[in-house]
Image (tube, rainbow, N blue to C red):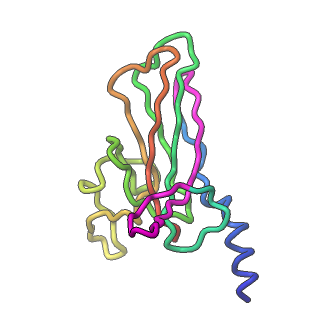
Amino acid sequence: MEMSMRTALVLSLAALLPGQALAANQVALNNSVFVERVSTDASGKQRVLLEEPKVVVPGDRLVFVLNYRNAGAQPADKFVITNPMPSAVRFADAGDTQSLVSVDGGKQWGLLSELTVAMADGTRRAAQPADVTHVRWAFQKPIPVGGTGKLMFRGVVK
């Protein structure tokens, strides 16, 4: 039984990969996902390591990295990246980046602390990280021709 569970986890790695991030202009995107592991050396010092996600289990922390590059001939103005959350992952945070999130499939956007979710009885409750369906970054300044950068967000395997 344990072996089949491991096989299922390995096969489900595809479900952890972020959906295709959407961007306008001629900006090239490259998505990567890593498992965040903490190791402790003999002296007790802890280090955070990012590893390829060969096998993941519920509770593993993942780091999603989006590298972007303006491959166009013009600055990329009003640039927005929208990334759907993988269905097997619960949103954790977007680090120190200024991201907006959606809890309704991308219809409405805001800071997680400002959003609410409708309950079956018609009332609303404060949105939680598990409710996040999409993450979005809206750049305030144009990305120059050839300009590059990196965005990230974290999630936890459900």
Quarter of the picture holding the N terminus: bottom right
Q: Residue at x 45, y 40 (%)?
A: 151
Q: Residue at x 47, y 36 (%)?
A: 150
Question: 51 or 9, which lies in front?
Answer: 51
The secondary structure that most of the magenta stretch takes on is strand
Left or right: 124, with 45 as reference point: left
Labels in figure, total: 0
Question: 129 or 45, which lies in front?
Answer: 45
Left or right: 22, with 15 as reference point: left
Numbered range of the magenta stretch: 23-50
Q: Residue at x 74, y 74 (%)?
A: 7
How far from the left and from the top, in percent, is residue 142?
39, 19
Q: Residue at x 57, y 21 (%)?
A: 26
How far from the left and from the top, in percent, is residue 62?
51, 59
Left or right: 102, with 68 as reference point: left
**Would residue 73 be counted in the magenta stretch?**
no
**Quadrant of the image occupied by residue 54:** bottom right
Q: Residue furthest top?
A: 73
Q: Residue furthest front?
A: 43
How far from the left and from the top, in percent, is residue 94?
38, 50
**Quadrant of the image occupied by residue 12:** bottom right
Q: Is residue 55 above or below residue 112?
A: below
How far from the left and from the top, in percent, is residue 23?
52, 32
Q: Is residue 120 above or below residue 140?
A: below
Q: Residue furthest left?
A: 114
